[in-house]
Amino acid sequence: MTVEPIELSPISDMFDPMDNPNISSLALDPATDLFLHRFPAFPPAAYAPAIWATSPVADEEETAFDVDDIDDNSSDTVDPIEDHEFPTYFQQIGSPPRLFHSHGSYVLPVDSDETKRQEAQHILLRMIIGSNYDAPVRELLNSNPGGRKVVDLCTGAGHWVLDMAREFPHVKFRGLDLVPIQTRYPPENVRFEIADVTERLCFADASVDVVHARMACLGEEAVPGFLREVARILRPGGLFLSAEWDAHPALHPRHPWAGGFEDYIPQSITFYDIASNAVPTLAPSIYTLITRNGSFEEPVSTRRVIPISTPHATGSNGLRFVGEVMERISQGYADALVAGRNVPLGIAENFKAELSLRNGVVSVYQTVFARKTVVSPD
């Protein structure tokens, strides 16, 4: 089925629904109802993740990308993690215990519950947008069959990469993350590696066609260096795709409390004030930082309002269902932050209770893409 996107018009300046409640109306074809069939909030994983191992490495001469595309000085091939190495990568926290990364800045659990929550979010976003990308990716990847390469930074369990690999079987994909929670049996055109994306990336200059980063959880101070690396590895004309949630929820623009959201959803504001310190978002700054980088053409930004609970002003069962699923996803997010001791239990429970009582609460989802500048020969 064709899914009509719920979207705001692309804008060129930074936009904060917290300061400007006059968000444009939802651009949804009234004849089209999203989600004509229901899907579980937490569906079974399409690829059961192997949290104790990364994907197996083939023979040394075989890599996901051509050998001459790899920077040998920074490339670090990853062998499967043995049982005795488990404590090096993972630790259990809380009661009941949940699995977390043993070191680094990743604060969310890395267990099956969190993987399913993230997959539900991935499926929902794909259905709302109507695609796995909000940019001219198809045209680029199909323009040179057999020779295109894509890198997914902060890949998590690899849901985006695995979906893309099925859509573009002729393209080579690589997913990078600090935490080895991806399937150990990916498709032939996919490889996962452990990597810190704030350091030098293991790809040669101008060797990659698309770089994707969704919910990268990077502090703003790390972004300029991160973008320099993205620009370095992208070929001229290549695409960088960013996708982030705003740091705070808002109210639907037609909500009667839209101008006084702090009084209507105080528990949600308190929760996200704390959560955004643990899980930072690039939404407020990524457009400006891409522009300042100087290696890209003007970015294109699209912002969508997505209900977190049952929407206030809609006759659409589809939108109502989106709100119901997003509420479950948000509740799972709160539980994950409590398990990692990043948010007090009482604040998280108050937030979840408020979501179930308040209509019209929305999140703003921002996608930005920018093309690396093509330098004309003198």
Image (cartoon, rainbow, N blue to C red):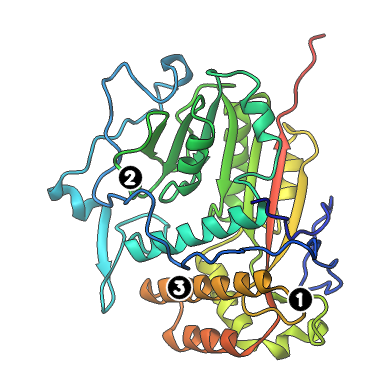
Three-letter amino acid code at disc 1? Answer: His
Q: Secondary structure at mark 1?
A: loop
Three-letter amino acid code at disc 3? Answer: Gly
Residue under the image location 75 percent in, 77 percent down: 315
Question: Which numbered circle lies on residue 252?
Answer: 1
Could you tell which of marks 3 and 1 lies nearer the N-terminus?
1
Other-residue count near label 1 (Cα within 10 Å), few / some / many at <14 / 14–19 / ≥20: many
Q: Secondary structure at mark 2?
A: loop
Q: Is residue 59 above or below residue 152?
A: above
How far apart marks 3 and 1 lie (CA) works out to 22 Å
Residue under the image location 14 percent in, 49 percent down: 83
Question: Which numbered circle lies on residue 183?
Answer: 2
On screen, residue 8 versus residue 233, left or right, reads: right
Residue under the image location 80 percent in, 15 percent down: 376
The residue at which mark 3 appears reads as: 332
Q: Image quarter for residue 184?
A: top left
- Residue 197 visible at all: no
- Residue 176, image x and y in percent? 43, 40
Q: Between residues 77 and 45, which one lies in front from this camera angle? A: 45
On screen, residue 115 versus residue 290, left or right, reads: left
- Residue 289, image x and y in percent? 71, 46
Residue under the image location 35 percent in, 48 percent down: 47
